Image (cartoon, rainbow, N blue to C red):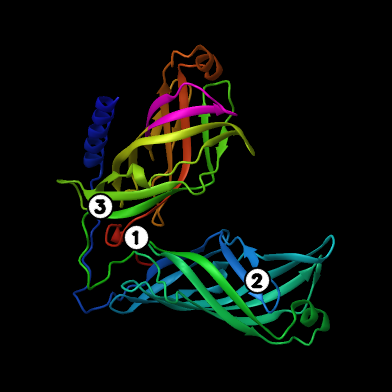
Amino acid sequence: MWGRLGRRLALLVTVTSVVAGVTCATPRPATGETDPLPRRVRLGVGADAALSIGALPAFAYDGRAGLGEGSAVETSPGVYALHFPAAQVTVPPLEMVPFLPRLPLEVEIVPRDLNGTFDVCSGEMELDFDAVFVPRVGSRRLTPLSVVTPLTSGAVPLDALGSGRLSGTAQVPATGDVLVDTLLRLPAAASADLPVHVHFAGGPPACPADSVDPSARGSMEVRPDSRLKIGRRFPWFPYDGKGSGGGLDLTPVTGTPGATHEVVVPVDSLHVPPLLMFPPFTQARVEIQPAEMRGVLDACTGSVHLAFDAVFQPVVGTWRTTPIAVVTDLTTGVSSGDFTTLTGAPMDEWGDLRLVGVARVPKTGDLFVDLLLGLPTDAVTDMAVHIDLPAGIGCPGAASTP
C-alpha cells in the first residue's frame, strides 16, 4: 500500500508541476511602505456565539449564515482599514426564547455600516457595527432599535490564520414603546461575543516586519455540504464534516512556480468524524482512522490533489466488522471509477474548493462485509472544503479589488 501511495504522490507532484504554468508572485512594496491597492476581504462568523441584553440570560447564536464582504486598505505597514458596505453584510436573525407559549420572539438585524481596523502583525481587530434591531413577536414588527456596537479582539488577538473572537458592549436606550421597553427591559446594556474569521482574497498578507516562512502551516476544514457513497446499492450519505480537518504543512516544490507547494496533513492534527449511515442514529456508522494525507496545492490555479490513506471500520452497535484499508486520490479535477465520474472545483480566492475522489475497495475476505457492501466496488467522496493558507503563501494576483 505504501509503495502504491508513494507512486501516486510522485505522479501527482509531476503532473501538477507541469500543469502549473504561471508565476503569480507580485512584489510587495519596500519595507516601511504601504500597498496603495485595496484588497478584497470577507468576515465570517462562527456557530459558537452568544448575545445578551440587560438582565435577560445570554442567547446562543449561530452566526454561520452571517457574512460581510468589503475592502481592506493598508493605512500603515501591516495595519488595514476595513470597510464592509451595508449591502454586502448579511446577519442572521436572533431567535429568542418565547415569552409566551407558541408566540415566537425574533430580532431581525439590519446592518447599516461595518468599519474598523485589523493589524496583521499583532492580530488586533476593532470594528464598529452600526445596525437597526427590529423585534418581532409572531408576525408583528415592533419599534426598531438603533444600536452601534464596538467589537474588539481584546486581550486575545486573532491567530495567524485570521481566526479569533470579537466582543463588545453597547448601551441600548428606551424606545418609548412600552411593549418593547418592557420586553427587553430597556434601557439596558447589550453585549456580543462572536467567533470570527477574516479572509483576505488570495491569502492573508504577511506582516512587513516578518520574513515569509517558505515552510509554514495552514489549515483545512471539511464543510457540511459533503457526501459519501459506496457501491451501487447504497444511496449517497450526507456527511456533516463539522469539526473535521487539520493543519497543513506546506513546502515549496523545487523547480515549479512559487505558488506550488507540497502539502502534508499531520495525522496527529487530522480529525475525521464518523460517517453516520442513518443519521441521527449513531448505532450504524463507519469510523475513519487516517493513516496519511499528502499531495500538492497551487494557490494560483486552485489545483489541489491529495492522496488520503485511511482505515474504514464499519460499526453496528457494539459489533465491529473487518477494517477496510482504502487509499483515495482526492482532486479538484476529474475522478472516475467503474460507475461514477465526478468533477471537483478548484480553490477560489477565498480558499473554498470541492474535492472528489473514487477509490476501488477490494474484498476483505469477510463474507458478511463483502456481501453487505457489495465488494469489490467503488467508494466515492464528494467534499466541500475550506483551506486557510498562512501569510505570504497565497496568490497575490487575486488580492486587489477590480
Please tell me which residue is depicted at 21% across the width and 36% down the height of the picture.
Answer: 14
Q: Which circle's residue, 1 or 3, is located before the other in the chain?
A: 1
Give the image location of residue 247, x and y in percent. 35, 50
Residue 98 lies in quadrant: bottom right
Q: Which residue is mark 2?
A: 109
Disc nearer the start of the sequence (3/2): 2
Q: Amino acid at mark 2?
A: Ile
Residue lying furthest right: 101
Dot 3: element: loop
Residue 316 is a magenta residue: yes
Q: Residue furthest left?
A: 255
Real-space CA distance between mark 3 and mark 2, rounded to the nearest whole angstrom: 40 Å
**What is the distance, in whole Å, between disc 2 and disc 1 at their CAs?**
30 Å
Q: Which residue is mark 1?
A: 203
The N terminus lies in quadrant? top left
Nearer to us in this view, 244 or 24: 244
Q: Are marks 1 and 3 in contact (CB under 8 Å)?
A: no
Dominant secondary-structure state across the stretch colored magenta: strand
Q: Please give the residue where the numbered disc 3 appears in the rendered image.
A: 259
Horizontal side of residue 277 vs 262, given as left or right: right
Q: Identify the secondary structure beneath mark 2.
A: strand
User: How far from the left and from the top, in percent, is residue 322?
Assistant: 47, 21
Q: Are marks 2 and 1 in contact (CB under 8 Å)?
A: no
Q: Crowding at label 3, few (<14), some or many (≥20) Cα neighbours within 10 Å?
A: many
Give the residues drawn in magenta, as a range.
310-329
Ranked by sequence position, the earlier of labels 2 and 1 is 2
Rendered residue at 75%/86% (across/down): 175
Q: Residue 102: name its quadrant.
A: bottom right
The type of residue carrying mark 3 is: Ala
How far across and down, in percent of the image, does residue 333 sit? 38, 37
Determine whether the residue tagged by mark 1 lies in a helix, strand or loop: loop
- At 80% from the left and 80% from the top, the residue drawn is 182
